Structures are given as C-alpha cells and as structure tokens.
Amino acid sequence: MQSEEKQKLLSEEYLAFLREIAAEVSDPALQARITDMISKKMRTSEEIPSAESNPWVKFAGVFQDDPLFDDFVENMAAYRQELDAEIAAYNASLEEKQSA
C-alpha cells in the first residue's frame, strides 16, 4: 500500500473516530471543537482535487517562479474592468432607450 493510500485510510479512520465520539462528549466546548475539526477535514478533502479527477491539477504552480505572471494577472484584471465598464455603459444606454 502506498503512503498516500495509507494517509487517506488513516484520515478516514480518524474522521470516523471523531464522528463516533462527538455525540458522547459531554463538554460543549470540546464537542464544538470536534465538530469543527470534522467539518474542516471534510471541506479540505473535498477541496483538494486529485490529478485523476481534474486534468488541470498537473499545471498547478507552473507560473509560481515566473516574474512576469503578476503583471499578466494585473493586466488581465484591468482589461476585465474595462470590459465591465463597457458592458455597464451599454446596459445603461439600453435602459435609457427603453425609458424614453
């Protein structure tokens, strides 16, 4: 069994154990912490896609050392804002025509 599979099994066993004891804990603060841990664990396992389930995962981090990538993202955001302004102006002109 590979280490990733072992970790997955351990985390699933741990999660099952937490679910099992959550109802038996009498301290409300501790019960709240356990419930929070369970929900975070479930969200984390759902949020991290595997390479098999999402073909884009293999490209994650490809631009992390690219010095031009931040500029690219800023330019993309600025262009998107320009488009949004154009669309808003167009919609406003349509509303003016309809009200006239």
Image: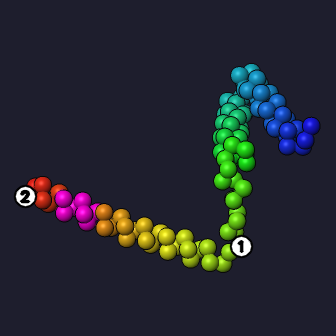
Q: Is residue 45 above or below residue 79?
A: above
Q: Amino acid at mark 2?
A: Ala
Q: Position of residue 17 (x, y in %)?
A: 80, 27
Q: CA distance from mark 2 to mark 1?
A: 54 Å
> Toward which corner of the image does residue 13 lie, by quadrant?
top right
Examine the residues drawn in magenta and state their main secondary structure.
helix
- For the view shown, which residue lies furthest in the right direction? 1
Task: Give the residue number, with chain letter if any, for mark 1.
Answer: 65
Q: Are marks 2 and 1 in contact (CB under 8 Å)?
A: no
Q: Position of residue 46 (x, y in %)?
A: 66, 40
User: Does the rendering let one see residue 33?
Assistant: no
Assign the N terminus to one quadrant of the image. Answer: top right
**Residue designated by label 2:** 100
Q: Report the side of 85 relative to 1 (left or right).
A: left
Name the outermost residue toward the top.
24
Residue depicted at x 55% and y 70%: 73
Percent x, y for residue 67? 66, 78
Residue at (85, 43) in percent of width and height:
4
In the image, 51 versus 39, the foreground residue is 51
Q: 6 and 51: which one is in front? A: 51
Look at label 1 and name its amino acid: Asp
Residue at coordinates 69% horizontally, 69% vertically from top-left?
A: 64
- The image quarter containing residue 95 is bottom left
Is residue 70 located in the magenta-colored stretch of the structure?
no
Residue in front for this viewpoint, 30 or 40: 40
The quarter of the displayed image where residue 6 is located: top right
Residue 91 showing in the rendered view:
yes
Q: What is the magenta range?
A: 88-94
Of the numbered discs 2 and 1, the one sitting upstream in the chain is 1
